[in-house]
Structures are given as C-alpha cells and as structure tokens.
Image (spheres, rainbow, N blue to C red):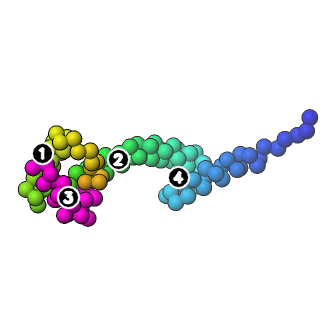
Amino acid sequence: MTRVKRGTTSLKRRRKMLSLTKGYRNARSTKEKQAHEAILHAGVHAFAHRRKKKGDFRRLWQMKMNAGLRALGLTYSKFIGSLKENKIELNRKMLADMAENNPDTFKRVTETLK
C-alpha cells in the first residue's frame, strides 16, 4: 500500500477555520483553538439573532403604525382590534409602510374601520 502524507489536509482545515475568523480581534483570529471556539459562539449568536430579528422588525412596524395612528386620533391596539373585527387581512409590514410612505391611503384604511 502506498504511503499517505496527511499534512495538506490538516493545514487546509486550519486555514479554512482561520479564514472564517478573519477580522476577529487578538488570538481569536490567529490561534486554532481560540478561532474554533469563536466560530462556534458566532454560529450560536447568528442562529439566535436570526430569530430575534423577526421580533425587532415587528416592534418597528408597530411603532410606525402607532405614530401614524396617533395623528389620526387612534391607538395601535384599538386599530388592530378593529382590523380583526372587520376581517381586513393586511399585515403589519404593509400597514407600517403605508403609514410611513402613503399617509392618505393609510387614512382611508382607518376611515373604513370607523
């Protein structure tokens, strides 16, 4: 059987890991063990914050809608309640965009609820 030298494989693995930690500070970007730990932690945070981002956007849409509604003399909670009562299926993202960019259209939507 022929001899297999394994140096290239481990070097390639190490270089790949260190390339993933490029831009990290201190030993986390230069030492293999600390780089591996940094990659694992970064992955955990990335996974959690992909989920968290959805809630952040929902809160942003609620604030935008509430700002537009206060100018019209309504509150966010009453507005959402009346939307569900009248079975109007516009999502918060669309309503927030309307409140910000098309206040006339948003006003017409609120008038249909009154």
Q: Give the structural element (helix, strand or loop) at label 2.
A: helix
Distance from disc 1 to disc 2, alpha carbons, whole Å, reads 23 Å
Q: Quadrant of the N terminus?
A: top right
Q: Give the structural element (helix, strand or loop) at label 1.
A: helix
Q: Is residue 114 left or right of residue 16?
A: left
Determine the residue positioned at 91% across, 38% down: 2
The residue pinned by badge 2 equals 54
Q: Residue farthest to the front? A: 112
- Tell me, yes or no, whether the highlighted magenta stretch contains residue 83: no
Q: How packed is label 3: few (under 14 Cα within 10 Å), some, or many (20 or more)?
A: many
Instruction: Between label 3 and label 2, give the one nearer the viewer.
Output: 3
Tell me the amino acid under the disc marked 4. Arg
Who comes first in sequence, dot 1 or dot 2?
2
The residue pinned by badge 3 equals 106
Instruction: Between label 4 and label 2, give the one nearer the viewer.
Output: 2
Who comes first in sequence, dot 4 or dot 1?
4
Determine the residue positioned at 21% across, 60% down: 105
The residue pinned by badge 4 equals 28
Q: What's the mark number on residue 78?
A: 1
Tell me the amino acid under the disc marked 1. Lys
Distance from disc 4 to disc 3, alpha carbons, whole Å, reads 50 Å
When asked about the image quadrant of residue 78, the answer is top left
Distance from disc 3 to disc 2, alpha carbons, whole Å, reads 23 Å
Looking at the rendering, the stretch of residues picked out in magenta corresponds to 96-114
Who comes first in sequence, dot 4 or dot 2?
4
Q: How packed is label 1: few (under 14 Cα within 10 Å), some, or many (20 or more)?
A: few
Distance from disc 4 to disc 2, alpha carbons, whole Å, reads 30 Å
What is the x, y in percent for residue 81?
15, 42
- Is 3 situated above or below 72? above
Q: Tell me which secondary structure the magenta stretch mostly adopts.
A: helix
Tell me the amino acid under the disc marked 2. Lys
What is the x, y in percent for residue 96?
25, 56
